[in-house]
Amino acid sequence: MNRENVGKRKKYSDAIILSVGILSQQGANFLPKRLPSRIALFQITIHSWIMYNYYSASIVSARLSEPLDMMEDSVTVLADSNLKIAAEAVPYLNYFLYNLNWESDYFRKKRWDPLPESKRYLPIEEGIKQVGQGILAYHTDPNTAYPYVERMFDSNKICELTEIHLFKQSVMGMYASHNGQFIEIAKIGLTKMFNTGLRNRQIKYWSSRKPECQLDTLSTRSITIYEIAPALILLAFGIIVANDYQILKLLNEVGIGVSITQFTSIINIPQFLHTTYWNLGIFVDLECLVSDEDIVKLFYETSAYYMFDHLHQWLILEKNMNHILQLLNDNMFSIITDVTIAISKDDDYILYDVYNHCKNYGGLLNITKLGTWTKNDGLQIILQTNKFSRRWNYHRMKIKVAGVVVNRPKNQSLIDYLQEENLYEHTDNWSKFGYAIMEHVKQLFNFTNGPLIAGFKNGIYDLGYFPSILTKERFNYADVIMQVWPIRTCFMFLTVPSLKVDMNIIFRPFARNVWYMILILTVIIIFGLWIILKLEKNDSAYGSTILIIIAALCQQAAIVSSRLNAPLDKMNDSLYSLINSRMKLAAYKDIYFNILLHSSVEEIQYFKKYWEKIPEEKKFFSIQDGLKKMTTAKFAYHTDPINVYPFIERVFDKQMICQLTEVHLLRPSSLGLWSMRHSQFQEITKIGLIRISTSGIRKREVIRWTYRKPYCDKDKHYVSSVTIHETIPILLVLCFGIILSIVICFIENIIFHTIRKKQRQIKESEHQLKKNNQKNVAKNKTMIKIKKLMYKKTHNKKN
């Protein structure tokens, strides 16, 4: 720098600053011109570039890959830390602290026992909040805490969350009475739940997932040969077997996942071909060397596990059609079966569509040419029509459709009864609606009439026209085709004016602060009137008369407005409220009533316990008797509203219709039409029902077989008499006022007589004193006269 002749001589400090600036890549304020200086500067720059890049990279990598210094999973380490301790109040905590192991005993003696009782327990929300602040270690069940953590912690805090187990992870058991008779059957049931995955599903349902720690950046480090070796081995393997997996490549390119296995007798068919939600294409190449015994086993197992439904699409490659038809098992084929057999002919293939409507009902195997495949033209499909449209013809096959009716007259045929519309009695509406719906399906697919859950289970019936309630138990015996019938059941009763004495009715017109203001104004007015009356010289009654008239006018129409505007105090739609009301309960004896009581809903189970205490002879009434009892107070009757609405509209007056209250046992839902499990007619019926629903026929039939709720004219006010229960508070206040006035009057009279007596005594005392004073004056005057006479006498004697 000194030899560059840039002016004054440079100091060492300038050279140091320049070098540091270059090394830190912050720039330089000096540019050399001579070649040696430029070479030196270039070397410094290269050195800084190498050092800065690798040094900064190592620093960043170290910072990113540096793990959090988390505490060891040991309560002894926690006991020796400075963190505050608290826990959720749970019944098993003391057992863990006193009965587990030496670690929990050490933790209890050092940290838990010295802790004051008031500081040991915190609500979970407050505990998690303090954990987030880094000042507390809080003990609880992670399943309880994880939702709060996910809601209250940010991503950094979630990554910093540390867990120290007081009770290490283990599995809890279910208990039974010693040598109980139900142990083995319960054990079998639990084992089946394990095998079917129900336990795992329930664990996932009732457990809370741990909040995921999502790192914002990845750790930077060198990739070693040990990490890249598996990838290199996989690459070498792929190069070797590439030609054998061309089909995988072709299908993967169009987004289709592939799994290939060698077809042998030991293959697990249910596991390999099982699917629940996704379509599964199955390609079976029978041109390979496969024994007929293995092929028969394949088709037998796939039929046993219902693998010819709409989720499985089959493509079978074979050289001889007659050979494959002899091996094919079409017991579970139906209208939805998607099986294509490709018969090779030289280098080309002919495709055939194969299905059977229902072999159990005499159905025959249908084979239709679907198309061809050639090297030159590729795939050519001949059958362009919809699968269901071309398979609709069931060739006069007979199927059984079942339902349930309860109130059919003996002298009337079933078909006539199901088609009858009774304007006065709406009975068996579910069956009539279901039959009407199935009639429309029949017209769509040419069903004909022929001569329920148990029938489905035993395979007696194929379809049902009686809409039934969906329960878990029924799903084991039958399948739901579609939910079609809206349903609800309820307890119905009349809401009458309350019979309780409500003392608040006196204070209800005004809020509490208004009453306080009225009280203050009353005191002010009384004080003002007192001053005015004090200042009045002449006693006048005009002012009092005006005040009385104004007070009377202010009270008019208040009770009338209250009576007209007061709504009926209807009960909440809750079985708890119904039971607490102590009403008499009864029901119409429907076939589904006991099914409703088996619901696991807490409210219904609470009602069931109350219902079982009612005597059997008082539980059920006919609709007519139930309505008659409904007109009396404190009686609730359970039935399907559609059955009872026609009677209510004829029997009840307008006011009673408006007083009608409903408390649901079965909340509004939909009933489904059922079919036999894995029935071959299920899909075709479902298609018919969907068409009926979308075209509005289902809605029309619902309106036809239901009855509208009787109309309540809410704009019209029904004037009811004021009951004694409503006037009792006013009468009590009136009586209290009368008694209070009598007491005040009695006290005033006592005070008045006491004051008058004292005044009389004072007057008598004053009068007596006056008399005594007068006597004393006269006496004094006499004495003075005597003294004067005596004085004169003595004075005369001296003279």
Image: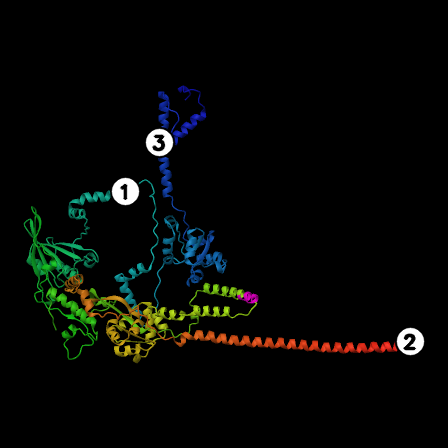
Expressed as whole percent of the image width and height from the top left, the position of residue 449 reads 11, 71
Quarter of the image for the C terminus: give it.
Answer: bottom right
Q: Earlier in the sequence, mark 1 or mark 3?
A: 3
For image coordinates 15% across by 55% down, the residue present is 282
Q: Earlier in the sequence, mark 2 or mark 3?
A: 3
Q: Is residue 677 visible?
A: no
Q: Residues within 10 Å of mark 3 (few under 14, many from 20)?
A: some
Find the magenta span and give its range.
Answer: 529-536
Residue 49 — which label?
3
Report the front residue among 215 and 194: 215
Q: Reply above or below: 780 against 323.
A: below
Expressed as whole percent of the image width and height from the top left, the position of residue 353 reads 9, 57
Tell whether position 532 is magenta.
yes
Tell whether position 628 is magenta.
no
Residue denoted by label 1: 228
Report the front residue among 403 and 667: 667
Q: Reply above or below: 748 against 12.
A: below
Expressed as whole percent of the image width and height from the top left, the position of residue 186 reads 30, 68
Residue 795 — which label?
2
In this rendering, position of residue 586 left or right of residue 702: right
For image coordinates 23% across by 74% down, the residue present is 646
Residue 491 — which label?
none
Mark 1 secondary-structure assignment? helix
User: How far is mark 2 from mark 3, CA to CA?
Assistant: 159 Å
In this rendering, position of residue 673 left or right of residue 735: left
